[in-house]
Image (tube, rainbow, N blue to C red):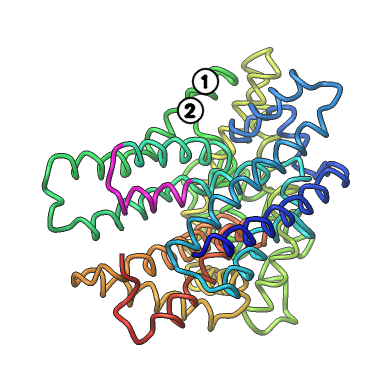
């Protein structure tokens, strides 16, 4: 790139970043329904953003809102710039592609996400995700311990802030294995691969230690299976109680089922719907009353009352109740899915399709993943980037669809990789992938 062109591009970028930053600081902080639970460090919240908010509350109590907005805005824009520069270099983007990329990267700062203004984890998790992805790509390209250490550092911060990314290192571990397959039996390669594979375990132990110190229970952050049980309850039937082993689980299921049936929040209550797209749309709109106001509230109250009889400590009983309802929901989710698998899997597919706005795009991404995997498997390493983009996009969508409903807040992180998939295909269709 010529020096004059580079100077012009950097000037335009500075203007764009300044405008975005001014937008952030001239709009008020947004206190969403989730904000209170992070400020109060409730047991079902991951430690990363809790520690961040507690630190800023202590350091900038009088200017808490503005300090958070400034940090999230600046940190987010630094990450965007870092990702933009690396991506433009890796993909050798044209000017129009750079413009599109920048629009996609700064889109989360505006309506409806407002990641920098919202006092929620996305203000940190979005820039951390961008740093983590670029660091992993740097590691796969350069294969150095320093690059790996940087990637794992960002991973720890990211996964402690947003739990949906806990398994992401496994994608890069697999990509690293495919990339280095001829030398994979070397001690250094095995060690690096093992580090990537073991990081989710390290993360779980770190998070469990945090809850032991704060809540008195060695546990992972609860609520994952409470969320996942929502779709399982939605497709359930009354007879499922016969297949539930434990008394507490059965009582909670029957209480929740009765309430959902009375409020017509079950799939079996929707007689006027005739397709799984319609069934999903109803489910999508009613996740809060099914999950938060029924399964979680009734289950947590049941265990809280039970634990309070054993201990005089409200804090201990509250933390134990979160842990117990998570454990119950894990058991119920597996049982209810097994008993109603045909209904659940069709709802699950409709859930993923909703996240891609079309089943056609979903099928296309699946095809690209399989195609690039086969190419890389048979030693055509030039397709490794295509594989990573498709794997990141699809794995996150699948995890989100299993755990909850497909909303933009959980999926926007990977919109940029859908764009990269099309860039790769359109610009390199007649060539053998992307070189280097």
Residue linked to disc 1 = 212
Q: At which x and y percent is residue 303?
A: 64, 32
Q: What residue do we see at 65% from left, 46% from top?
A: 76
Quarter of the image with the C terminus in it: bottom left
Circle 2 SS class? helix
Callout 2: 10 Å neighbours few (<14), some, many (20+)? Answer: some
Which residue is the extreme one toward the top? 312
Above or below for 398 versus 268: above
Q: Residue at x 53, y 63 (%)?
A: 397
Say whether residue 243 is visible: yes
- How far across and how far down the image is residue 34, in percent? 75, 42
Q: Residue at x 76, y 54 (%)?
A: 289
Labelled pair 1, 2 in contact (Cβ < 8 Å): yes
**89 vs 247: above or below:** below
Residue bounds of the magenta highlight: 132-145
Residue on which disc 2 sits: 208
Residue 297 falls in image quadrant? top right
Q: In this rendering, would 407 be left or right of 2?
A: right
The chief SS type of the magenta part is helix
Residue 124, given in percent of the width and then of the height, sits at: 63, 41
């Amino acid at each position: 790139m010529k020096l004059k062109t580079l100077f012009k591009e950097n000037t335009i970028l500075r203007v764009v970043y300044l405008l975005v930053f001014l937008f952030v600081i001239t709009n008020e902080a947004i206190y969403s329904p989730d904000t209170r639970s992070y400020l109060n460090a409730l047991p079902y919240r991951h430690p990363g953003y809790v520690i961040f908010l507690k630190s800023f509350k202590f350091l900038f109590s009088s200017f808490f809102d503005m300090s958070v907005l400034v940090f999230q805005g600046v940190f987010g824009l630094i990450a965007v710039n870092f990702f933009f520069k690396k991506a433009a270099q890796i993909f050798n983007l044209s000017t129009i592609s750079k413009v599109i990329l920048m629009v996609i990267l700064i889109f989360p700062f505006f309506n409806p996400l407002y990641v920098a203004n919202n006092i929620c984890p996305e203000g940190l998790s979005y820039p951390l995700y961008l740093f983590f992805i670029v660091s992993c790509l740097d590691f796969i390209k350069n294969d150095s311990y320093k690059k790996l250490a940087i990637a794992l550092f960002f991973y720890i911060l990211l996964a402690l802030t947003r739990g949906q990314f806990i398994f992401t290192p496994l994608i890069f571990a697999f990509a690293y294995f495919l990339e280095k397959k001829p030398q994979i039996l070397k001690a250094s390669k095995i060690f690096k691969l093992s580090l990537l594979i073991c990081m989710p375990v390290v993360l779980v132990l770190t998070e469990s230690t945090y809850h032991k110190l704060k809540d008195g229970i060695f546990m992972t952050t609860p609520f994952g299976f409470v969320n996942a049980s929502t779709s399982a309850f939605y497709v359930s039937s009354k007879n499922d109680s016969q297949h539930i082993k434990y008394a507490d689980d059965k009582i909670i299921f029957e209480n929740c089922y009765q309430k959902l049936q009375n409020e017509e929040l079950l799939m079996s209550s929707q007689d006027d719907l005739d397709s799984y797209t319609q069934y999903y749309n109803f489910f999508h709109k009613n996740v809060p009353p099914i999950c938060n106001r029924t399964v979680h509230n009734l289950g947590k109250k049941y265990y809280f009352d039970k634990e309070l009889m054993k201990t005089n400590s409200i804090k201990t009983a509250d933390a134990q109740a979160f842990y117990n309802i998570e454990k119950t929901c894990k058991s119920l989710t597996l049982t209810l899915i097994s008993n109603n698998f045909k209904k659940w899997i069709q709802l699950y597919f409709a859930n993923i399709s909703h996240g891609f706005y079309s089943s056609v795009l979903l099928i296309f991404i699946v095809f690209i993943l399989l195609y690039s995997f086969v190419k890389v498997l048979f030693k055509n390493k030039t397709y490794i980037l295509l594989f990573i983009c498709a794997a990141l996009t699809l794995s996150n969508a699948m995890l989100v669809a299993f755990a909850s409903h497909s909303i933009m807040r959980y999926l926007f992180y990977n919109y940029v990789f859908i764009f990269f998939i099309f860039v790769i295909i359109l610009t390199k269709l007649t060539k053998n992938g992307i070189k280097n």
